[in-house]
Image: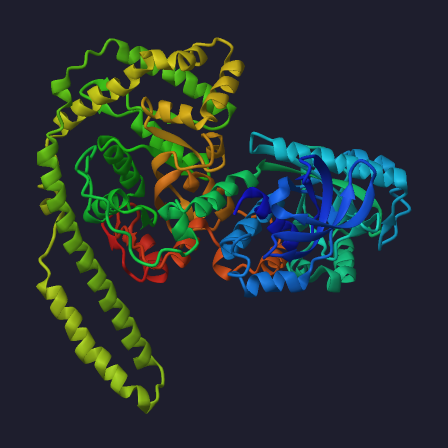
């Protein structure tokens, strides 16, 4: 599905007008606004209401889809949704396959894109269109526009649509929206619009019409500095009234007045306001990369897994030698590293205190040892800062290893990175590299890697059998404690007899695998490996002196730090430059959000590793996932979910509008939970050994949340 068809799909389902460039039979290109009425798939033709932007004339047109050169959704417009067409697309996707391929996937992406746009704190904006409207004489139903007002709004919307179409960057998008006040609170700092209806331009009727649904602002920014929250004005018990605002509007007004002892004055007059929202990343162009993957049939395994398109377990790539910083490691961690290196998707459940950071560190070092590039991300700075600090502090004897890892992010982080690169380059200048010190004894390591893989497979089978036995025990315990019918008696006997015996026999037949068995197949000479790491890291950084990096050296040595930051961000926005940069820094660390600055939205890294994936929201997490051929998610679904500002009412409306299944619910799921629900063929590995807390502290959590599967080593 190309970008034009993607926009057509959105317009049909969202009820929006499109701005198009249309080439007629004579070869002339004309700009139109179109509202889609029907689709003729066989003729690849649309029946539309067309607004000519030169004369502002409206007429019904029949246009060919293949003659549409460009198309972009016009935000803030209203077009009646052809419900029979939407239902037909949903019920007969094969009929529309030549236009809208992978309809279900596209609905999920559009839903997540809209959630991302609304998951932010709004604020008042001096919207220039307001001055063309009599904001105080607005009826609650509509605002009829005169010809001058209509022309000004069309002109303004067209300019915004052109800016969106021509945008090269995907970050820091400012969205403006006309709205009708439904209920506001007059605070000391200013007006807090708790509830409003978005105003959209009904092009055909030349009117501004409010949406049927009400938007609830649980948070609102006043004067750019002061954030208001509804919990300041509503008792906790009354907060639930917001779930059905239209039904409870009078109760909400009374509750606010009562809770604030009459100090908060509520205002429910319908007048026009300007609402602004700052979108950190516009996901429209990011997600277009996924659409193009399916169109070109080169979809990465992580993207397939996200949409539940993996029908069988992927074959392992090959046996990679595992390289460890030290031998402080257990079998679960080794198994996790091995899975991440061998398979395109790996999910690691790391409860607190089980060594997930150690696992990530050794996975990154192993990837580097095997000459694979890594994008390491998390939603927040804290976890990735910890790993970065440890990687750049590695020691060989009394010397710091110049490990080639680059930390990118916001302006301050990029400034730090520029200083860090200069220091690193200066450090390696005096290091003489001899090829014999870089001998990795590859054949020996490959053979031992195969043996280690087989050993870890035995351990994995043993863990699987133990978990199956635990499941049977819980099932038997449940039946013992509940009154079951006589018809289930044979089933219970089979559980306790034949099935339990089969598992016990299989466990007994498995050889016991220990950490020592695994460590025998790894490099035991830590000093030798750290020496290798020291010199090969220096070799990578020394590449900066090559002629092809003259532009990059100029950026790094620019004394104007602000200009250098701008130049580096521009440099890494090009995918070819990212590939060049990976020859020096094969490991790049940043946040999920800042990953959009790294090249185009395409697979640029051998693997993406995401830490605290159970606290990463689904929409933003796809940015770094798109950029990796393989994926390792590290998280714990028993921990806190992502912080989401989008209200439940709006989320449910969007889910219904796009027919999105519950496993993709933006409010209730993290990216980790989405993958566990969608990918039925890949394995999840639990890090069993807990090293941090006193048994009396972790014991309760172990029993309640982890089914007593944790082995407490503290």
**Residue 254 in which image quadrant:** bottom right
Residue 665 in sight in this render: no
> Where residue 117 sits in the image (x, y, percent)?
61, 44
> Where residue 211 sits in the image (x, y, percent)?
75, 54
Question: Against 661, is 504 above or below?
Answer: below
> Where residue 11 sits in the image (x, y, percent)?
65, 50
Q: In this view, does 239 lie to the left or right of 523?
A: right
Applied colour scheme: rainbow
Residue at 59% x, 56% y: name it: 41
Q: Is residue 552 left or right of residue 34?
A: left
Q: Residue furthest bottom?
A: 486
Question: Against 244, is 521 above or below?
Answer: above
Q: Which residue lies furthest to the front in this view?
A: 26
Residue at 8% x, 35% y: name it: 444
Q: Is residue 423 left or right of residue 295?
A: left
Q: How many marks?
A: 0
Residue at 52% x, 42% y: name it: 288
Q: Is residue 711 left or right of residue 42?
A: left
Viewer-nearest residue: 425 or 156: 156
Viewer-nearest residue: 588 or 353: 588
> Where residue 103 sits in the image (x, y, percent)?
52, 56
Residue 200 in sight in this render: yes
**Residue 539 in which image quadrant:** top left
């Amino acid at each position: 599905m190309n970008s034009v068809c993607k926009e057509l799909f959105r317009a049909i389902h969202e009820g929006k007008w499109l701005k198009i460039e249309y080439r007629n039979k004579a070869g002339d290109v004309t700009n139109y606004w179109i509202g889609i009425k029907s689709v003729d798939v066989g003729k690849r033709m649309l029946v539309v209401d067309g607004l000519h932007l030169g004369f502002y004339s409206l007429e019904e047109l029949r246009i060919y889809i293949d003659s549409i050169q460009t198309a972009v959704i016009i935000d803030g417009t209203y077009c009646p949704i052809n419900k029979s067409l939407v239902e037909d697309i949903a019920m007969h996707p094969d009929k529309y396959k030549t236009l809208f391929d992978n309809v279900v996937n596209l609905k999920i992406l559009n839903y997540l894109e809209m959630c991302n746009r609304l998951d932010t704190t709004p604020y008042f904006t001096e919207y220039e269109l307001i001055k063309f409207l009599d904001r105080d004489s607005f009826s609650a139903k509509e605002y009829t526009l005169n010809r001058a007002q209509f022309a000004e709004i069309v002109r303004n919307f067209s300019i915004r649509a052109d800016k969106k179409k021509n945008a090269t960057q995907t970050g820091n998008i400012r969205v403006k929206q006309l709205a009708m006040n439904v209920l506001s609170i007059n605070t000391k700092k200013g007006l807090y619009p708790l509830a409003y209806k978005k105003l959209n331009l009904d092009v055909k009727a030349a009117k501004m019409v409010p949406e049927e649904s009400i938007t609830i602002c649980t948070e609102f920014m006043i004067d750019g500095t002061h954030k208001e929250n509804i919990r300041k004005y509503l008792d906790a018990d009354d907060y639930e009234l917001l779930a059905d605002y239209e039904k409870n509007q009078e109760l909400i007004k009374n509750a606010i007045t009562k809770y604030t002892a009459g100090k908060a004055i509520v205002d429910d007059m319908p007048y026009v306001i300007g609402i602004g929202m700052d979108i950190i990343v516009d996901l429209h162009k990011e997600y277009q990369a996924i659409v193009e993957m399916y169109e070109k049939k080169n979809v990465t395994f992580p993207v397939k897994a996200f949409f539940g398109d993996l029908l069988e377990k992927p074959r392992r790539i090959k046996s990679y030698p595992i390289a460890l910083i030290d031998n402080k490691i257990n079998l679960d961690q080794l198994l996790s590293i091995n899975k991440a290196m061998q398979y395109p998707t790996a999910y690691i459940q790391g409860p607190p205190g089980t060594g997930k950071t150690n696992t990530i560190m050794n996975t990154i070092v192993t990837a580097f040892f095997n000459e694979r590039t890594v994008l390491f991300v998390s939603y927040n700075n804290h976890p990735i800062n910890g790993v970065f600090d440890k990687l750049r502090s590695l020691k060989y004897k009394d010397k710091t290893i110049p490990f080639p890892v680059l930390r990118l992010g916001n302006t301050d982080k990029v400034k730090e990175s520029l200083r860090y690169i200069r220091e690193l380059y200066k450090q390696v200048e005096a290091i003489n590299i001899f090829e014999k010190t870089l001998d990795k004894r590859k054949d020996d390591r490959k053979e031992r890697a195969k043996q280690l893989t087989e050993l870890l497979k035995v351990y994995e089978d043993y863990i699987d059998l133990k978990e199956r036995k635990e499941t049977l025990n819980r099932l038997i315990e449940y039946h013992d404690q509940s009154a079951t019918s006589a018809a289930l008696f044979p089933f219970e006997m089979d559980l306790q007899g034949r099935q339990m015996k089969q598992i016990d026999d299989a466990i007994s037949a498995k050889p016991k695998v220990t950490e020592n068995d695994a460590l025998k197949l790894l490099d035991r000479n830590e000093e030798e490996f750290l020496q290798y790491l020291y010199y090969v890291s220096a070799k990578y950084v020394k590449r900066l002196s090559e002629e092809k990096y003259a532009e990059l050296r100029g950026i790094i040595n620019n004394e104007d730090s602000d200009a250098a930051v701008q130049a580096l961000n521009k440099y890494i926005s090009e995918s070819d430059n990212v590939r060049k940069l990976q020859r020096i820094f094969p490991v790049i660390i940043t946040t999920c959000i800042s990953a959009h600055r790294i090249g185009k939205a395409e697979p640029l890294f051998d693997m993406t590793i995401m830490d605290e994936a159970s606290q990463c929201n689904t929409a933003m997490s796809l940015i770094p996932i798109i950029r990796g051929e393989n994926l390792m998610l590290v998280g714990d679904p028993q921990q806190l979910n992502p912080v989401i500002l989008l209200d439940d009412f709006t989320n449910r409306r969007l889910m219904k509008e796009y027919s999105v299944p519950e496993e993709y619910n933006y409010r209730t799921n993290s990216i980790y939970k989405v993958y566990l629900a969608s990918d039925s063929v890949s394995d999840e590995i639990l890090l069993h050994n807990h090293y941090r807390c006193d048994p009396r502290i972790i014991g309760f959590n172990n029993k309640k949340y982890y089914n007593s599967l944790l082995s407490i080593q503290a």
